[in-house]
Amino acid sequence: MTYDPARALELLRTGSGRADAVFRDGQEDAIRHVVDGLGRLLVVQKTGWGKSFVYFIATRLLREAGHGPALLISPLLALMRNQIAAAERMGVSAATINSDNPDDWSDVEARLGRGEIDILLISPERLANERFRTEVLAGIAARISLLVIDEAHCISDWGHDFRPHYRLLERIVRGLPPNLRLLATTATANNRVMADLAEVLGPKLGVSRGNLNRGSLSLQTIRLASQAERLAWLAEQLARLPGHGIIYTLTVRDAGQVADWLNSRGFPVAAYTGETGDQRESLEQALLLNEVKALVATTALGMGYDKPDLAFVIHYQMPGSVVAYYQQVGRAGRALDAAYGVLLSGEEEDEINDWFIRSAFPTRDEVGQVLEALEAAPDGLSVPALLGRVNLSKGRVDKTIALLSLESPSPIAREGTRWQLTAASLGEAFWARAERLTALRRDEQQQMRDYVGLPFGAHMAFLIKALDDDPAAANPPALPPLPVVPDADLVQAAIAFLRRTSLPIEPRLQWPTGGLPRYRLSGRIPENLRAETGRILSIWGDAGWGGLVRQGKRRDGHFADELVAAAAEMVKAWNPGEPPAWVTAVPSLRHPGLVPDFAERLASALGLPFHAVLAKTENRPEQRTMANSPQQARNVDGSLAPSGSPVPRGPVLLVDDTVDSRWTLTVAAWLLRKSGSGKVWPLVLARTGQDQ
C-alpha cells in the first residue's frame, strides 16, 4: 500500500489532542517505513519522543487499507493500560489478554474473530501459554499485518530488564514470513543491545535512532548512607519541590516503608509495587490527576507510564544499571522546561543489587536438584510436589523451570500441571550465557557506582556516553542542585519511625502437605491448639532495630538492653486481648542461652515470671538453610518437646529471635496449648525475609 501523509498527520493531531501537532524528527519516516513494507525496523528514541504514535498510526493506516490486526508484545500491565488509552484516542480499537483480565478473554477472542480489534496487546509470557498459542494466536496468525515488539531491549539477554520469555520471540521471528511488517521500539539500547537485536530480528534490520539528551532533566546524585538520612531528606525536599513525581525503591518492602514514613509526615503518597494488585490502575490515575504528591514505586511502575508533567523522579537507592536508571528517570520532565532527577545512594543498595545479580539465573546445584527430582519421577511432578523433594524456594523452582523450559531444545516439558524430563540435555551454552550476563551486570553495577560519584552537572553526559550516544549533546542543568545534608531533627524523627515499626505474625492454620509424621499431625490445626497473631520487632539487618538484632546474634552472642526495652514497649503498645501472664522461650541447642536470656530479661521488664518449659530434643540445621515451607516444616518435625517443667495456666508470651517459615512457632504453640497453657502470643525480634 502507499503511505498517506495527510491522513497520518490527521491521526497524530487526533491522538495528541492538538490541532497544531506536527511529527517529531524521524516519526513520520518510521510510520512510512512500516506502512509501505520497507523491511523490519528498530526505533531507538528517548522516552517521550512518541514511539507509540508510530505503531498506532501505522496500525490504523493498515487497517483502513484492509489489512489484518496488529499484535503488540508489551512487558508491563501498566504500560498496556496507557497504550490502550492512547490507541483509543485515535480511533484504534485495542484490547489485551493478560493475567489480570481472565474474565474478558472470551469476549476479546470473539471480537478478534469478528475483526473488531485493530491491535491486540499481550505480554511475552502469554506466548508460552499453550491455550493462547493454539486457540487465539493460531486463529489470527495468517491475518496479522504488523508485529510490534515494545521495549525491545528486553530481547537482549543482558538487558537491564531481563525477561526470559522475550527469548520466545527469537523463535517466533525466525518463523515469520520475510515480508511481514515488524517494528521494534525502545528508549534504551546501547551498541551491545543493538547488536543483540540485529541478531534476533534480522541482519537487514533498519534502525531509526535519535539523540538521547534530555535537556529538561536536572540530574543530581547524593550519598546518604543511612535510610534515616534519606527518609529525612525526602520529607524535607518533598515539602519544597513543586509538582508531582515518582520515588523509586529497589524493593517492595522499602516502597511500603518510605510511603508509610511520608504519610506519617502528612504527604499524600502511596506505594506502587508488583503486590499492589487491583489498586494499580487507580493509583496510576491518582498520579496522572495530581491527587497524590508522589507514588513510591518499584520497577512495576516503569516502562511506558506516561505523565508528561512529572516534575521529579527520585531514587531512594542506586539502580543496578545505567540502562535501568535512564529508563526510570526519563519519566520526568517530558512536557516541562525543567524537572529534577535525583539519585540518593545508600549503604544497602550494593547488597540488594548483588542479590538481584546472583538470583538472575539458577545455579548448577539448583538445576541439578530439579532435574534429579524429575528423573526420579517418570510420570512428572507438579511444582508443589517438587517443593517436597528439593531444598529450594518456590521462587527459585519457578525461575529454574521457566528458564529450562525456554531452552531449545528444552530438557523439560509440561504435561498438564506436571513437568517431565525430555530426551534433550541442558547444553553448556546455557551456563555460558548465564556467566556472560552475570559479568555484564557486574560491569553495569560498577558503572552506576561511578555515576554516583560524579559532580553536579556531569551526569547527563555520562548517561549519554554510557548509552553509546554523543555526550557533547548534553546541556548544563536548568535547575540548581538540591541540598545534600538533611535536617538533623528530621533524621532523629526518621530513626524513631524506623524503630517503632512492628510487623504481625499471622498464625498458620494448616499443617503442611504430607503432615508432620513424627508428631502425627495433619490437616487443619484446631483453633484451641494454634498460636495467636504475634508481633515482630524488626526486619533482620534493617535500619531500625534489625541491625542490632543481627549484631547481637552474629557478633555479640547477647542481645542488647535496648532491644529488651524496645520489645517491652512493643508489648505495651500491642496490648493483646488476653494479656500474657508469663513468658517462655523457643529453645536452641546451637545457641542455648541466647533467646532464654533475652526472654528472661524481657519478662522482668514486663513484671512477669519466666518459665523454660520447652526443650530442643535434637539438633537440626538452622531454618534459614531450609529454602521452602515443606522442607522447613520437616526440619521442625519431632525436634521440640515439653521440658518436663510444669506448664503454667494462662496466656503466654512465646519469644524467639528470628522467624522465617513460622513452623517453629506453630509447633511450639501447639505443644504449649496441648500441655495446658492459655493463648500463645508469639514475639520475635526479627523477620529474616523468608516466606511469611
Image (spheres, rainbow, N blue to C red):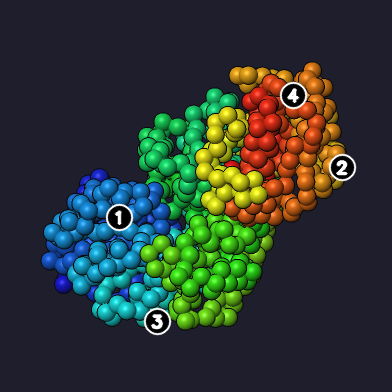
Q: Is residue 185 visible?
A: no
Q: Which of 534/56 is in front?
A: 534
- As drawn, the label of residue 203 is 3
Name the residue type under label 3: Pro
Circle 2 residue: 556
Give the class, few, some or many, for how many residues have Cα within 10 Å of label 4's Cα (few <14, many ≥20): some
Name the residue type under label 1: Ile
The image position of residue 683, as x and y in percent, is 69, 31
Disc with the residue nearer the chain's start (2 vs 3)? 3
Location of residue 631 with respect to 253 vertically, above or below: below
Rendering quarter of residue 282: top left
Circle 4 residue: 648
- The residue at 21%/57% (across/down) is 109
Circle 1 residue: 97
- The residue at 27%/79% (across/down) is 177
C-alpha span from label 4 to label 3: 78 Å
